[in-house]
Image (cartoon, rainbow, N blue to C red):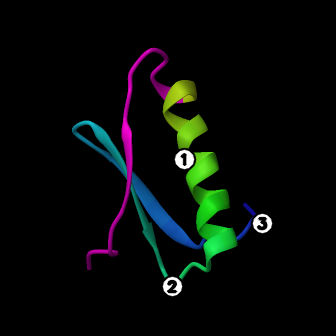
Amino acid sequence: MDGFLAGLWRLDDDALVIEPFGRLDRTRRAGVTAEAERMPGALHPGTAYDIRFGTVRG
């Protein structure tokens, strides 16, 4: 959102999973969620995905 890498995302079956590197406050989480809702439409038009938050796996 601000040009800095702050986490990872991946498509996992029927969900777009967001794995932030740190804690997201309410405003930032809402912004990330809004961006995530637009992402699948650009990558896979016509396919529905849930938006989920996870933990970065090492």
Q: Quadrant of residue 15?
A: top left
Q: Give the x, y percent position of residue 26.
A: 62, 74
Residue 25's place in the image compared with 17, above or below, is below
Q: Residue furthest right?
A: 2
Q: Secondary structure at mark 2?
A: loop
- Left or right? Give the position of 39 relative to 46: right
- Left or right? Give the position of 14 relative to 5: left
Distance from label 1 to label 3 (Cα)? 14 Å
Q: Secondary structure at mark 3?
A: loop
Of the pair 32 and 9, the residue shown nearer to us? 32
Q: Which mark is residue 22?
A: 2
- Magenta region: 43-58
Distance from label 2 to label 3 (Cα)? 15 Å
- Whichever of callouts 1 and 2 sits on the residue coming sooner in the sequence is 2
Q: Which mark is residue 36?
A: 1
Are dots 1 and 2 in contact, CB under 8 Å? Answer: no
Type of amino acid at the residue the image marks with label 3: Asp
Tag 3: Cα neighbours inside 10 Å, few (<14), some, or many (≥20)?
A: few
Type of amino acid at the residue the image marks with label 1: Ala
Q: Give the x, y percent position of residue 52.
A: 36, 56
- Residue at mark 3: 2
